[in-house]
Structure formats: C-alpha cells, structure tokens
C-alpha cells in the first residue's frame, strides 16, 4: 500500500457542502475520508452517498456500542452503504464484536458488495490512567488495557483497532503484522498540536507500525490543504 493510500482525512465539518469541497480538493492526494458523528448526525446517510458518487473511500467513524444484536444489525446497514471501514467500541465485548462480523459478512454475501473492514476503538486518547482507574474503574495501565482490547478484537474477528501512536508498537507485537492499526494524534513538526496531547510525526507513526494515519486539522485547516497533504505523504514515505 502506498503512503497516500494510508492517509485518512477527518472530515470534521457540519455540512455536505464543506465535505464535498474538501473531497474534491484532496481526493487525488489521500486514500480515505473519515465521516464522524458530527457530519453524519448533521447530514445523515446522504453524505455517504454523495462522497461515494465522487469516488471517495469512506471510513464511517460512528463507534457503535450497544447490545450484540443491535450492533450487528447496525453493522449490516453500514455494509449496505458500502463503506470501506466502520468501527465499534471493543468495550462492548467479544459477543458484540462477533455479531458485527457475522452480520457484516452475511449482508455483503447477500448484496454481493465488498466487506467493510471492522475496526475496534480501544482506550480513547482522551482517557488517561487516572480516569481509567478512578472514573471507569478499570485497573492497570492504559497501555495494558489497549493491548488487552486489541487482542480481544482480533480474537473476535475484527480487522484492526484505532489506538494512539504511543501504543502502536505494543499492539503490533501482540497482534502480528496483518492486524490493521489506525492512529490519530499525528502531527508533523510544522503543524500545531491543537488539543492532541500525545502526538507523533507521520514518519514516526509509520515506522512504529501504523497501517493508516488519521489527520484532520493539519490538512483541513491549512492555508493550502493539498500542499499539506502532499508534505505529510512525503514524510510518511521517508522512513
Ligand atoms: O484534527 P485532528 O488531526 O486532531 O483530527 C483527528 C481525528 O481523529 C478527529 O476526527 C478525532 O475525532 C479522531 N480521533 C482522535 N483520537 C481518538 C479517536 C479519534 O483524535 N482516540
């Protein structure tokens, strides 16, 4: 896979119009577009259809988390929408993840479409050790919990996980070379960190073993987004 194919752009905007503008500008320079809860809840499934009609590959980042049957059925709906990947919370447990896989496979066999990659969200990067232990009541370190959930996701049939750059190496060791690792919190040295705290550069993240990088504001907020995307793709390849 080329560096460009590994770059996912976060379309953190409210409207189809803004999203279309970013996609038409960037689609020759990046691999995948991420639609999250902001854009999806604002515009609904129509935004997926519109960006597909422009030729974009979609990561639908809705972080499903509910009882197994409900997540399975929602996964079937997302499969019908022909997204390239979607995600669920690993905290929903193995039965929930297995149902997502089962319903997704059944739906794609029925509709003849390709199977979306199903990705597990591990510990959110906004959760630190204090919050994990004292608010969520989960003992141990963030890193151990991330690896535990990554292994659970793999054993449940998921294709990969989302995790912070700092945990890539440990997940790669635990889950092997074919497991997909998607990492946000990527910042080139020339971009502002914004509210991301534990960041890595694009080159460092790829070198550590990331399969895909999610980048938002360093590209979407740049004076010249195309130039910023090209620079990041170059830096990803320089490892
Ligand atoms: O603008 P920025 O590059 O910080 O955007 C990163 C994207 O990755 C956002 O859409 C954010 O919601 C998402 N993300 C994250 N940290 C996580 C999970 C998702 O930053 N742990």
Image: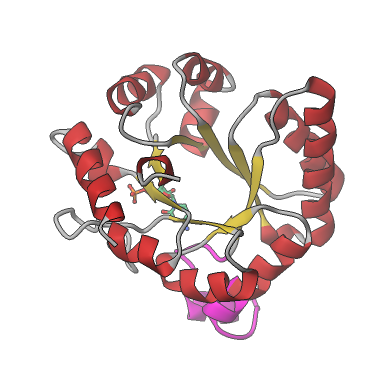
Membership of 134 in magenta stretch: yes
At a point 36% along the width and 24% down the height, the residue shown is 23
> Dividing the image into 4 quarters, which one contains the N terminus?
top left
At a point 54% along the width and 22% down the height, the residue shown is 48
Depicted 105 relative to depicted 215: above or below: above
Depicted 190 relative to depicted 171: above or below: above
Residue 135 shows in this picture: no
On the image, the x and y values in percent for residue 232 come to 25, 48
Describe residue 107's horizontal placement relative to residue 238 as left or right.
right
Q: Nearer the viewer, residue 199 or 92?
A: 199
Depicted 223 relative to depicted 233: above or below: above
At a point 82% along the width and 52% down the height, the residue shown is 98
> Dividing the image into 4 quarters, which one contains the C terminus?
bottom left
Membership of 192 in magenta stretch: no
Describe residue 74's horizontal placement relative to residue 35 as left or right.
right
On the image, the x and y values in percent for residue 86 come to 61, 41
User: In which quarter of the view is residue 81 placed?
Assistant: top right
Residue 189 shows in this picture: yes
Q: Nearer the viewer, residue 83 or 196?
A: 83
At a point 55% along the width and 70% down the height, the residue shown is 172
Describe residue 215's horizontal placement relative to residue 218 as left or right.
right
On the image, the x and y values in percent for residue 188 come to 22, 56
The magenta stretch spans which residues?
Answer: 123-146
Depicted 190 relative to depicted 8: above or below: below
Describe residue 72's horizontal placement relative to residue 43 as left or right.
right
On the image, the x and y values in percent for residue 37 come to 52, 38
């Amino acid at each position: 896979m080329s560096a460009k194919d590994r770059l996912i752009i976060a379309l953190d905007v409210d409207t189809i119009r803004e999203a279309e503008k970013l996609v038409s500008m960037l689609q020759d320079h990046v691999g995948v577009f991420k639609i999250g809860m902001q854009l999806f809840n604002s515009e609904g499934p129509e935004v997926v259809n519109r960006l597909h009609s422009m030729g974009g590959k979609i990561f639908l980042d809705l972080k499903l988390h509910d009882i197994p049957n409900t997540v399975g059925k929602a996964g079937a709906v997302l499969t019908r929408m022909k997204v390239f990947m979607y995600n669920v919370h690993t905290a929903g447990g193995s039965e929930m993840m297995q149902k997502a896989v089962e319903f997704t496979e059944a739906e794609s066999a029925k509709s003849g479409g390709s199977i979306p990659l199903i990705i597990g969200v591990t510990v959110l990067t906004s959760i630190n050790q204090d919050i994990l232990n004292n608010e969520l009541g989960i003992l141990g370190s963030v890193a151990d919990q991330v690896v535990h959930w990554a292994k659970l996701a793999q054993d449940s049939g998921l294709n990969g996980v989302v995790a912070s750059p700092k945990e890539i190496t440990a997940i790669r060791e635990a889950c092997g070379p074919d497991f997909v690792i998607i990492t946000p919190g990527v910042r080139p040295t020339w971009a502002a960190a914004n509210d991301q705290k534990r960041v890595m550069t694009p080159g460092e993240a790829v070198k550590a073993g990331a399969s895909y990088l999610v980048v938002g504001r360093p590209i979407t907020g740049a004076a010249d987004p195309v130039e910023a995307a090209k620079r990041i793709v170059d830096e990803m390849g320089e490892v």
